[in-house]
Image: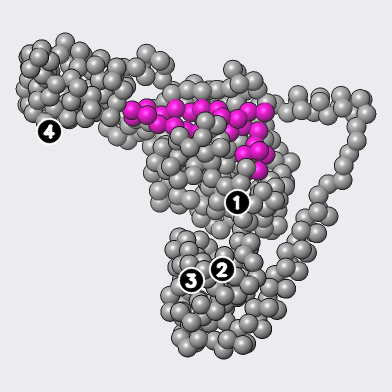
């Protein structure tokens, strides 16, 4: 069956905000490549030749066959270049570049293989020595965050991951408990922030009560790349100089130039991370779940974006979940403690009455039940305010909570005098708000 080159071109064009890179040409997005490119370039794309090189390199790295890639390149040339490049010269150039890309990739793979450590065979006395080193490794948080280890904290957007991580930083800097529950080793902290930026992070740091003189080294969107040798050397130097035991990274996707979907590349990234851990610091890395977030897998860390090698290298993986306004921190992978000993807690993020401080604190089962009921009560009141009145079945259909929670909320609202109920058709209970003014004041 013949390949539809036009369909392949459309597929690439609509792929989304994928970055394309080529040494000497900078970087741009797929969207930039599919704008009109005049002879002198269009701003992001420095000329038609540069655009052709970037597109061909992108197709090669994506595993496309040469003949298909060449067809896509020619269609792109006709559609986007003004005027189009000479087709014969473009074909000759593409042929040379394809060989060059292949040779460069093979060279990188050979260098990666040569950089891999030799196999070390241990006898029993050496095994005992290595086991003693592991047992003496210690913890930043007993049973939860290993010293010199790799920890991931994953979540979908807007699930409270940043608050959890900032509270971890607060705890390490002050010696106070993380989430108000877990004892932490006090230590200076390095925070490589490539995600939020100082304008958004600083107010949160202040609201959490982190003192101005805290031993925090912060990098504000500095373009840090762990696959950059100079960057790693600078990081390691500061770790040793300040005796830093925790390095927080936000987020994984922004601190490397590798292919996050490639197990080979992510294995290389772990080798770079190893330099930081060998310097004595624990790496705590924020990472995003795939689109859709919760519910894509029964295994929590399988929801994380990218190649499986990312989470395979981790010592501990924590997932932040959210339901009915209550957050939950769950250990989804641990290679150092048993499943039953791994930490798991529900927590809330709440402001003080004057809104000057924010508290991220664990809650017990009783408080969790009360808060879940309160959230359901608010949802029931909002539904009845819009509907005027409704029977039990209609309320359960209209309120996106579990049926048992809705029933408990209705009973609670009646007991507290906030709802009235009367008999409807066929004995059904019909509920309505008792006093709008009273409820406006309460809720």
Which quarter of the rendered picture does the C terminus lie within?
Answer: top left
Q: Specify few, some or many for label 2: CA neighbours under 10 Å numbering under 14, 14-19, or 20 or more.
A: few
Q: Give the alpha-carbon distance from disc 4 to disc 1, as whole Å.
A: 47 Å
Give the label, 4 or 3, closer to the camera: 3
Q: Earlier in the sequence, mark 4 or mark 2?
A: 2
Q: Earlier in the sequence, mark 4 or mark 3?
A: 3
Which quarter of the picture shows residue 52? bottom right
**Marks 4,2: beta carbons within 8 A:** no
- The residue at the far top in this view is 415
Q: Give the alpha-carbon distance from disc 1 to disc 2, as whole Å.
A: 28 Å
Q: Which residue is mark 4?
A: 386
Q: Nearer the viewer, residue 253 or 280?
A: 253
Q: Earlier in the sequence, mark 4 or mark 1?
A: 1
Q: Which residue is mark 2?
A: 2
Label drawn at residue 372:
none
Q: Residue at x 35, y 33 (%)?
A: 357
Q: Residue at x 14, y 21 (%)?
A: 391
Give SS at disc 3: helix
Q: Which residue is mark 1?
A: 261
Which quarter of the rendered picture does the N terminus lie within?
Answer: bottom right
């Amino acid at each position: 069956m013949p390949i539809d080159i036009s369909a392949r071109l459309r597929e690439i064009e609509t792929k989304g905000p994928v970055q394309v890179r080529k040494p000497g040409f900078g970087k741009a997005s797929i969207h930039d490549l599919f704008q009109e490119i005049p002879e002198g370039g269009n701003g992001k794309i420095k000329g038609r030749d540069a655009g052709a090189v970037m597109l061909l390199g992108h197709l090669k790295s994506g595993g496309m066959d040469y003949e298909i890639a060449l067809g896509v390149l020619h269609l792109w040339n006709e559609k986007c270049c003004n005027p189009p490049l000479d087709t014969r010269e473009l074909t000759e150039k593409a042929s040379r570049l394809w060989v060059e890309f292949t040779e460069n990739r093979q060279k990188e793979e050979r260098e990666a293989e040569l950089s891999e450590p030799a196999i070390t065979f241990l006898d029993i006395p050496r095994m005992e020595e290595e086991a003693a080193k592991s047992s003496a490794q210690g913890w930043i948080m007993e049973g939860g965050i290993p010293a010199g280890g790799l920890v991931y904290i994953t979540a979908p957007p807007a699930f409270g991951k940043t608050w959890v991580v900032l509270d971890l930083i607060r705890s390490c800097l002050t010696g106070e408990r993380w989430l108000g529950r877990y004892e932490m080793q006090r230590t200076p902290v390095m925070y490589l922030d490539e995600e939020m930026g100082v304008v958004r992070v600083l107010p949160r740091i202040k609201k959490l009560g982190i003192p101005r003189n805290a031993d925090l080294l912060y990098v504000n969107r500095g373009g840090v790349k762990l696959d950059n040798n100079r960057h790693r050397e600078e990081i390691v130097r500061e770790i040793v100089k300040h005796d830093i035991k925790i390095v927080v990274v936000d987020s994984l996707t922004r601190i490397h130039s590798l292919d996050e979907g490639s197990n080979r590349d992510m294995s290389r990234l772990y080798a770079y991370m190893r330099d930081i851990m060998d310097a004595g610091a624990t790496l705590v890395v924020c990472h995003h779940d795939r689109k859709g977030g919760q519910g894509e897998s029964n295994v929590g860390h399988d929801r994380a974006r990218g190649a499986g090698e990312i989470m395979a290298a981790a010592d501990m993986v924590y997932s932040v979940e959210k339901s009915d306004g209550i957050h939950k921190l769950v250990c989804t992978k641990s290679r150092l403690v048993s499943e039953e000993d791994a930490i798991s807690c529900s927590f809330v993020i709440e402001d003080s009455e004057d809104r000057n401080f924010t508290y991220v604190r664990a809650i017990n089962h009783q408080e969790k039940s009360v808060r879940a009921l309160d959230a359901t009560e608010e949802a029931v009141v909002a539904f009845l305010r819009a509907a005027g009145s409704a029977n039990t079945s209609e309320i359960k259909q209209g309120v996106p909570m579990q049926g048992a929670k809705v029933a408990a909320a209705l009973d609670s609202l009646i007991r507290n005098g906030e709802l009235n109920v009367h008999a409807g058709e066929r004995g059904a209970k019909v509920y309505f708000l008792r006093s709008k003014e009273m409820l406006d004041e309460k809720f």
